[in-house]
Image (cartoon, helix red, strand yellow):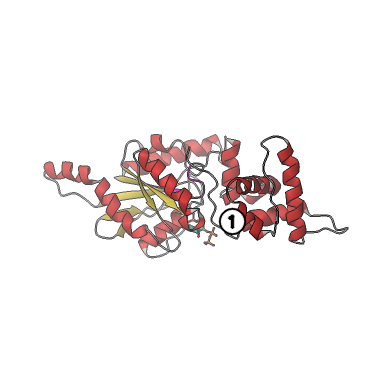
Amino acid sequence: MNLQWYPGHMARAKREMSEKIRQIDVVIELVDSRIPAASRNPLVDEIVSGKPRLLLLNKTDMADPEATAAWKAHFENNGLTVHLVNSQNGQGTSAIAGSVHRLTAARRKRMEEKGFRPHPDRALILGIPNVGKSTLINRLAGKKIAKIADRPGVTTAQQWIKVGKTMELLDTPGILWPKFEDPKTGMLLAATGAIKEELLDFQEIAFFLIKTMLRRYREPLAARYHLSDLPELTGNHDDQDLMIRLLETIGKNRGCLMSGGRVDFDRTAEIIVRDYRSRKLGHLTLELPH
Ligand code: G4P
């Protein structure tokens, strides 16, 4: 993501999206499986305005399969049609057109009843920056489509891409802004790399990742950084000291030392964040459905 979103950007993005949505029959909403709630925009329901919707949990290869199954069930319980996909290698993507076709059955029936021949299912991919929209469009198109800038107001000529026999996909995605207001959401977006690097405090993110792992993914944490006995979180302010000591041990074990032999905390924190993003810490989902 290349810019901060300001109210003006958001209003413009929303307007552009509404225009695009008017032309389509089905919205394909893309989220990141590692942070399925944080990578959604709360305004999506309003923007989609009652059109049938398919929810894709993307980057499933990066997430914890058990957590992904729990999220799928959670969204289905909320009435959504959900698919698990990996846009990078195409896993799960061949089922999209069929699902979209089922979601337009009522529209086709209405058209046929009026004596019209139904047109192909027109779909739009929508999501916040970095969830994989361009990768999925390229995958479905079977070719490389130019990536558009992550900001509203950059208009390009739109084209429809044929996907299978029944679907037509708009070649430019709808870009929603991430919701930063809640600090926890900001942290989740930062941890996965959805926010510009200069805005990040790696130590804060590393602490957040370590905390999550101490709660739910203790083994991969111990294994990656050769930690023989992991502490238990106390839930009170002692946790901060505990995290600093743990970061220090990880720094020592990774040889992240400054002159004089002191641990370089910033570098250690950055290593942890990069290890998470490159899956060296395993397949970790950072939030669970309530
Ligand atoms: P966007 O249009 O929504 O902004 O996202 P984009 O497709 O550019 O994807 C953002 C990053 O996520 C890209 O990596 C892309 O390869 C990766 N990605 C997309 N879908 C998947 C998936 O299902 N699994 C995994 N593991 N990665 C996925 P990048 O490093 O930013 O770019 P690149 O080096 O791959 O070109």
Q: Is residue 273 magenta?
A: no
**Residue 174 position within the rendered picture, expressed as x and y whole percent measured from the top left:** 42, 47
Task: Give me the residue at 30% from left, 59% from top.
Answer: 162
The residue closer to the viewer here, 227 or 160, is 227
Left/right placement of residue 127 relative to residue 170 reads right
Tell me where the magenta segment starts and ends, as one range. Answer: 29-37
Q: In this rendering, is residue 284 above or below 107?
A: below
Neighbours of disc 1 within 10 Å: few (<14), some (14-19), many (20+):
some
Task: Give me the residue at 72% from left, 35% from top.
Answer: 237
The residue closer to the viewer here, 24 or 190, is 190
Hey, which quadrant is residue 238 in on the image? top right
Q: In this rendering, is residue 262 above or below 176?
A: below
Q: What residue does disc 1 label?
A: 277
Q: How many marks?
A: 1
The residue closer to the viewer here, 193 or 280, is 280
Q: Is residue 155 visible?
A: no
**Residue 189 position within the rendered picture, expressed as x and y whole percent measured from the top left:** 56, 46
Q: Residue furthest right?
A: 260
Q: Is residue 205 visible?
A: yes
**Residue 282 position within the rendered picture, expressed as x and y whole percent measured from the top left:** 56, 58
**Residue 226 position within the rendered picture, expressed as x and y whole percent measured from the top left:** 69, 60
Task: Give me the residue at 83% from left, 58% from top.
Answer: 258
Q: Is residue 34 magenta?
A: yes
